[in-house]
Image (spheres, grey):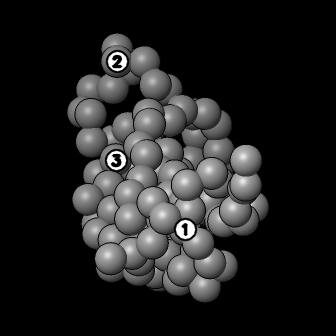
Amino acid sequence: MTLHKAKKVVIITEKLILKGVCHIIEECGGTGYTIVAAGGKGSRNVRSTSDRALVIEDFANVKIEVIVKSINIAETIMEQVNAKYFQNYSGITYVEDVEILRSKKFNHE
């Protein structure tokens, strides 16, 4: 088995801006992403993943993960999301080193 080095960008933010963040990911060369409900505590108080806690679903938090082949793509995604959204919406983004099995899945075509 051969593993290939890649980068995983993680963005935790408000569901309200999800479509715009996904658009940035695709425009920057991301070939796909994973979205899951997110909850926790941060500088803007506690967010729950419980359905009962959400009066309006758009105010829920989401965690978006995208694997890309280069640090340049990862940094571009992070910079654009930060510049466009994080002045007015809560959010955090970080990058991790990962190893992937099928590197061809992450080529932008």
45 or 79: nearer the eye?
A: 79
Which of the two labelled residues, at mark 2 and mark 3, occupies the earlier sequence position? 3
Name the residue type under label 2: Asp
Q: In the picture shown, does residue 42 fall above or below 29?
A: above
Which element is circle 1 on? strand
CA neighbours of label 1 inside 10 A, class few (<14), some (14 to 19), many (20+):
many
In the image, residue 16 lies at what x, y percent?
A: 29, 52
Task: Name the residue at 24% across, 33% down.
Answer: 56
Q: What residue is rendered at 57% in x and 48% in y?
A: 44
Tell me how far mark 1 sits from mark 2, CA to CA: 32 Å
Q: Nearer the viewer, mark 1 or mark 2?
A: 1
User: Which residue is denoted by mark 2 in the rendering?
Assistant: 51
* Above or below 79: residue 101: above
Viewer-proximal residue among 102 and 12: 102
Q: CA–CA distance between discs 2 and 3?
A: 14 Å
Residue position marked by numbered label 1 in the rendering: 68
Q: Is residue 7 visible?
A: yes
Name the mark on residue 15.
3
The mark nearer the N terminus, 3 or 1, is 3
